[in-house]
Image (cartoon, grey):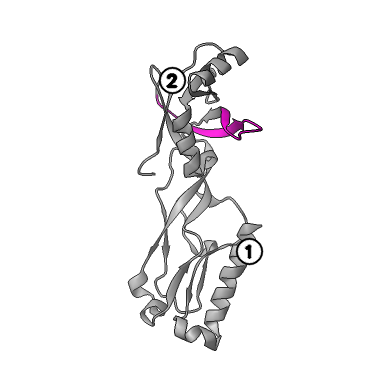
Amino acid sequence: MAGEIPDLHATVRTGTGKGAARQSRREGNVPGIVYGGGADPLAIEIPFNVLIKRLKQGRFLSTLFNLKVEGQEDVRVICRNVQRDVVKDLPTHLDLMRLRRTSKVKLFIPVEFVGEEKAPGLRRGGVLTVVRNEVELTVTAGDIPEKIEVSIEGRDIGDVIHISDVTLPAGAKPTTDRDFVIANISAPSGLRSSGGDADEGEGEEAAEAEAAEE
């Protein structure tokens, strides 16, 4: 289970419709709606500055939040849409969906590398090149892993670690079928010009970066 799910504070918005939404914006808030989860829709508003800060942190549409609204029970939500002003590109409305504990959700999970002291490639002076320090997984809302561990025990220079080499937490799976690269162990800089396994590892990394950009 994830160590911490970030809180998202909101207040109940009085009134519905375009007039109430405009009033909310005049007061420095961004109006929104919370729906799903077997409960009635709830009109909310979030301070503009708070939402902007969250958006700048990135991954807003793939982050699970603990929504805290005064007078309401806390509920896990994920943002399904942020409407923006077509000219200023600033948020004007957001839609949040409630999640049951059994709901499936796509989230980016941090990667932690272990077993470095037992990696022959590193002992020989090789360098661990991390291609992905987080991986997008489909997980169950009630059982979100805090991280995934990637062991490099026994790995040598030139070895490439793919997602298929990683034991994922129960109930979690990658959001893509492509067997993408997580990391590789490249040769020390003084040996890279000699080619061989080091070039192969670096080629995998370059191919992975190119695919990610697409």
- In the image, 39 versus 67, the foreground residue is 67
Q: Which residue is mark 1?
A: 210
**Residue at position x 50%, y 75% in the image:** 159
Q: Residue furthest top?
A: 15
- In the image, 174 versus 44, the foreground residue is 44
Task: From the top left corner, tell me how far across and down residue 5 is, in percent.
Answer: 40, 39
Task: From the top left corner, tell me how far across and down residue 146 is, in percent.
Answer: 39, 48
Is 78 one of the magenta-colored residues? yes
Task: From the top left corner, tell me how far across and down residue 126 is, in percent.
Answer: 42, 78
For residue 6, above or below residue 195:
above
Q: Residues within 10 Å of mark 1 (few under 14, many from 20)?
A: few
Is 161 one of the magenta-colored residues? no
Marks counted in the figure total 2
For badge 2, the amino acid type reads: Thr
**Residue 39 visible to an observer of this rendering:** no
**Residue at position x 43%, y 20% in the image:** 11
For badge 1, the amino acid type reads: Glu
Q: Residues within 10 Å of mark 2 (few under 14, many from 20)?
A: some
Q: The N terminus is located in which quarter? A: top left
Q: Which mark is residue 152?
A: none
Q: Which portion, as a residue range, is magenta?
A: 74-92
Task: From the top left corner, tell me how far across and down residue 3 is, in percent.
Answer: 35, 44
